[in-house]
Amino acid sequence: MPEPTSTKKISFRKIIRRESGFLVLTVLLGLFPFVMNLITGSGLNDGITKYWQGQLIAFFIMAVLAMSYDLLIGYAGILSFGHAAFFGGGAYTMALLLTHWGPTFASRYRITIPGGTDITTLIIFIASLLASAVVALLIGALFSATSARLKGAYFAMLTLALAEAIHILAKATDFVQWTGADEGLHGVPIPAWLNPTQFRLRFYFIALAFLVISYFVIRRFTNSPTGRVIVATRENEDRMRMIGYNPATYRTITFLTASLFAGLAGAMYSLWNMSATPSMTSAVTTVNMLIMVILGGMGTLIGPIIGAGLMQTLSQFLYNFFGARWPLVFGLIFIFIVLFFPYGIVGTWRLKQPDLKAGWERFRRLLGSKPPEQQ
Amino acid sequence: MNAFTTNQSPQPLLSVENIQTFIGQFHILEGVSLTVPANSITVMLGRNGAGKTTTLKSILGLTPPREGRVVFDGMEIQGKRAFNIANLGIGYVPENRAIFRQLSVMENLKLAERKRGDLEQHADFIFDLFPDLKRLYKLPGNHLSGGQQQMLAVARALVPDNKLLLIDEPSEGLAPILIQQMMEAIRKLSATTTVLLVEQNFIMASQLAQRYTIIDDGKSVHSGLMQDLAQNEELVHEYLGASVRTAKSGGEQ
Amino acid sequence: MKFAWKKILPIGAAIIMVLLLIAWGWTGLGTASFVRTTLSGLTLGSLFFMVAAGLTLIFGLMDVLNFAHGAMFMLGAYMGWQFYTNPTFIFGISPLIFAFASGLMLLPLIKPALIRWEINSKLQQNLPRIAYALALLMIFFAFNQLDIMGLADTAMVAITTTTADNPLAELSAQEPLLRFWVRPALMLVSGALIAFATAKPGDKTEFAVAEKTTQKWIIVAALFVATVLLTAFREALPETVLLMNGNLRFFLAMIVAVLFGLVFGGIIEITLIRPLYQRATFIVLMTLGLSFVIREVVQVLWDPLAYQMVRPPFFAQPGKAETVLEWFRNGNSTLNIFGVTFPTYRLFIIALGLVMFIFITLLMTRTRLGMIIRAGVQDPEMVEALGINVRQVFTFVFALGIAMAALGGIGAAPFIPVQPLMGDQFQMQGFITVVLGGMGSYVGAFIGALTLGLARAFGDYFALKLSLSPAIAEASTVIIMIIVLLIRPSGLFGKKE
């Protein structure tokens, strides 16, 4: 949905009011481990509290991934099937650098700050993260460069095929000593202070911060003039071209932004799992992202976050009920949603908001409170 | 009701009553009414974008009207599927010569058959009107010139037995000599069928049609006999303004 | 003469290039490896074409990217394979399906009368709902405690015992007819109820004419008779099929796969795709979800395992045939071609692809339906305006595309393992083929499939020589596609926008 705002200066009060829902959610998530700790009595870094933190960490990362995909298919209306390439690209870069470059670097150099603290691993980590971002951006650039002249289905197919090529390369036995081929990279030596098994709580807050920062950056991007041009181009490309905007430029910008966040999410995911596997680059991953975005509602940004959460809960829940064949039920639910709720949860909610308000009024009248004054 | 609907003949072949059509979220037709008496030529006049083409498509069910009535041959047809409406005996000649370019002339005509033998039955009549088509019979549609494509588009509507022809801008982009030929053809075929014509070329329209309806801004604003309109300069200028002047100067050259 | 040159030049250049390549390959690679690699490439290309043909037709006419095509390919393989090794499954289910269909086919017959029925608006609203609910209930009872898993399970038994020795030994006893007949009867009534509900009784805005009634009655009657026969002989028929000559059985299996594809594709189009034509993105999502569900259902029925279908006897005799005649006489599994020992079944796949191409060419150029499809690719609205029911044509083309994928599936089944993911690889290659050839062009799909198949085969050959993995050859097809798209953004034979 295009936001009809044109803020010249950003006032924090305004942002807080507009994003109140998201901010409340953030605070709740921030308090979650401590509340769990109080209720269950299990330590912050073990037991059930740790387990749920783990679930939520995966959710945070997937939410960023889904948001970045929503930027492409929801906001810009670009049906790209290659998003797993960015995700996998980021993940593999992170894992490869930490496995093959990090130890060699650490064995040769020691970097300390004046206080005497050793920050070598921090430098390696930051460099790897930057490299992941750069690689994801490069893949994004490759996508937008090769697809610049293509339209509709040809475009969709090209993105699908490019991602497939990257998937094939990730699986290829030719690079087995680096990538581990079919097996992927496991036991990536990530910096000790970041180890998600040892410092679960720390990783939890890093992942949460990652989600919050990504959300606000992407939100800022979609509300910027560039973001509005992108939405307008989705609605009517010819008109925007006539006004003097070049749709190709804006497509490239969208691609790069989306690939950047997907790549960072990939890097985070490989840190979290301490692995990178070919399945992260496969079409199945893209389809999963697509499902998250559709579940939550395309072009809403908050929708994909909800979709990611829902997908994770739903898959757990269905697995408990239906065992190994849970995707069958999931697929049926998906078909049902596509047929009857094509705008997803958030989109449908926004559409039905007037109805809901009317229903709320009826409910209040039923309770006996005064109807609102007619003006 | 508008005043002009009163002076109609008792049994029109087609009558459109106050139809409202939306395309996407855009309200294109906001109340179009018109009547087409049998065995005559009725012309729809109006500026570009006034809604003439949409009216034709609404009659045929390609852009079904949301409200209003369309009565053809004593039967309400609004809301029915386009192919059902067409099969009741309505032929459609779209604008921009929308023939099938991948198909040969013969295949284009064959495709329009509603029952086996339609083409054989009407072939003589069609080739009499458009002798060129006989020569080009085996050629693919994309090898035809603009005028030939337009002829094929009209010829296609003549293959089955149609009671009503909806013809959209047959003279658009044609050379003057071809316009003459097209006019002659439409005059000849109107001897056996009823025609509802959309035409920007006022000269052509006034020479062909007996009745007119003016569409402006998605509404039908005036209708009556063509000979009355030709004398009513004020009305012509108000609704058709620029297009009439260009048509006139074009015609005089 | 201007345009003639424009046409002849690229074709001539292409032919010369192909000839040069052949000459170079023949001398450079050595006859044996060249022939072997070429034939392997043609086999692959043939399979790619079977997938791509349906994809390109469906996309050309309806702009639908069918992501369930690979799943349909797989399903075709499963259905054919089931008919071939375990006909009990198909014959156990089919009475119900046929009964339902014969009930449903009453729709065009009762509709003209029903919409003229004078009922009040409340009844008009609620009657269809009641009918739907009743129909669903009846379907539930029709399938209640029907041992579908048991029917499918015998496949596992049949696959372990060799069908040649005593195929009937493993046939398990089925529900007695006296109890079974209720199921098809319930399905018949529920089909009729759904026909009743979709006819929208009393709805004056609906439109239907009673025409060709005799023809339609004959269809209903034929389906009903088939139902009765299938119900009565549902134990005898599998036995007959299993005792049949293996080649004939395989041929019938192909027909079963095609029929299944036609029916299943038609149902999918009408119920799931048709409501979404206005929202193209959601069709993609729908087909994605569908492929998901189909794959899972197959895994529920036959477990996530890979099966090897037994080759029909015509391709099964061990030993090499020196001549084609010898192969035809003995049914050898391999044949000597220019000194290369090549599996005869792969030759069959090549032939099957060619037959399919000829069939499509004839359909598109020689029939009225082909004419409608070609016209519809350009402008479906105008086709509708000519009085042709385009929706029906859409349904048929979708069904046809699925049927071709299903035929490809059963064709491939004796050649590659039958497993739930067998279609995915072909779907990917099919998409690349279609994009390469130009979406909507069946000639493009043919050329594209040959190109890709040969590229894969020679890529594998060279990769082996350079000690690279076959993955590199697989990735090379993507590179070919990108290069073609950079030069021609709508493929080799695609229409320019």
Image: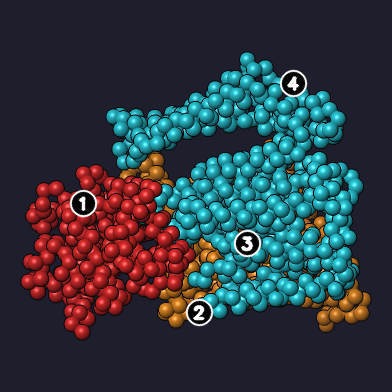
Chain colours: A orange, B red, C cyan
Residue at 57% from the left image edge and 48% from the top image edge? C400
Circle nearer the viewer, 3 or 1: 3
Q: Is residue B191 left or right of residue C308?
A: left
Comparing B7 with C297, the one in front is B7
Q: Which residue is mark 3?
A: C445
Circle nearer the viewer, 2 or 4: 2
Comparing C448 with C71, the one in front is C448
Mark 3 touches mark 2? (CB < 8 Å): no
Residues at marks 1 and 2, CA–CA distance in whole angstroms = 49 Å
**Place of residue C108 in the rendered image (x, y in percent of width and height, measured from the top left):** 41, 35
Residues at marks 3 and 1, CA–CA distance in whole angstroms = 47 Å
Rendered image quadrant of residue C428: bottom right
The residue positioned farthest toward the bottom in the image shown: B253
Mark 2 touches mark 4? (CB < 8 Å): no
Q: Which residue is mark 4?
A: C173
- Density class for disc 3 (Cα within 10 Å; few <14, some 14-19, many ≥20) is many
**The residue marked by circle 1 belongs to what chain?**
B
SS assignment at label 1: strand
Q: Which residue is mark 2?
A: C1
Q: Is residue A260 left or right of residue A221?
A: right
